[in-house]
Image: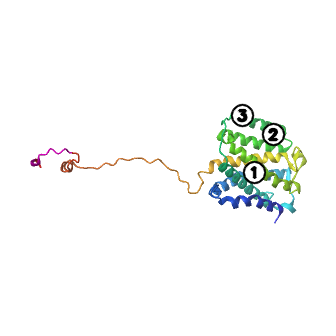
Amino acid sequence: MTIYLFIDILVIAAPVLLSFDKKVAFVSRWPAVFLTSLTVGAVFAAWDSLMVRAGAWGFAERFAGPAALAGLPLAEILFFVAVPFSCLFVYEVVSTYVPERAGRAARAPWIAAAALLAAAGAVLHPRVYTSTVLVAAALFLLLAAVSSPRLLASRRFWLSIAATYVPFVAANGPLTALPVVTYAPWAILGPRVLTIPVEDFLYSFALLGSCYLVYGALREPLRPGLRIRRPRQETRRTTNVSSSDRAKTPKKNARWTGNRSAE
């Protein structure tokens, strides 16, 4: 087992074991979680492969193993399953224990922020990793602002993003320290937090933000056992009674006149 694969297992182990907790009930969300991971992970894995081919970054074979698919080692492919799974678990825990206090669901500020990030990406185009990660974050903000502005106004969303940076640093620190992942100097700006390039923090935001956006659309429809209750419609029962039968049937509320001879 390679070091990178071992890190993947550590990242996903606790969320898998805690998925059966009755209060969070994360196991009931697995279908939506895995579909989200496959959908978003496929896009980011394709980007990853393009960056490897461009020489922007690479993987040390002794720590990550040989390339298995599209120039990526198996551990890197599993990264796009383990990380979204674990971070969506964090989101469900936060959603369970933290009351929601959504702010104003405004679109304009986020669209403006997306435009600024995209413009910065265009200016920094020679730094290919810096440029593409800025554009990726801009695309997420734009999509979220248009399709789900309440997500960006959600306290749970931002707390979840903040909470994921703790395991992010714990996992990405060894990956960049050994290093398992190597970066071309021309592809990044250069500043690092500990051993982690600053671009990786924005990369994590774009990846996880996209996961939360897709997951929000899938989590209820793909929840096992979920039934949509339709309002019960009242129906009037009508009985076809002929006029002759109606005449033979005494009226229950008929008044007794006391004249028994009439009977």
Q: Horizontal and vertical percent for residue 97?
A: 66, 49
Q: Secondary structure at mark 1?
A: helix
Badge 3 density bin: few <14, some 14–19, many ≥20, Cα 10 Å = few
Q: Horizontal and vertical percent for residue 83?
A: 74, 54
The amino acid marked with disc number 2 is Gly
Magenta residue span: 254-261
CB atoms at circles 2 and 3 under 8 Å apart? no
In this figure, which residue is indicated by the disc labeled 1? 44
The amino acid marked with disc number 3 is Pro
Q: Nearer the viewer, residue 87 or 187?
A: 87
Q: CA distance from mark 2 to mark 3?
A: 18 Å
Badge 1 density bin: few <14, some 14–19, many ≥20, Cα 10 Å = some
Q: Horizontal and vertical percent for residue 89?
A: 69, 54
First reached walking from the N terminus: tag 2 or tag 3: 3
Q: CA distance from mark 2 to mark 1?
A: 17 Å
Q: Nearer the viewer, residue 240 or 165?
A: 165
Report the coloring of the rendering: rainbow
In this figure, which residue is indicated by the disc labeled 3? 109
In this figure, which residue is indicated by the disc labeled 2? 121
Badge 2 density bin: few <14, some 14–19, many ≥20, Cα 10 Å = many
Q: Which mark is residue 85?
A: none
Q: Is residue 59 above or below residue 149?
A: below
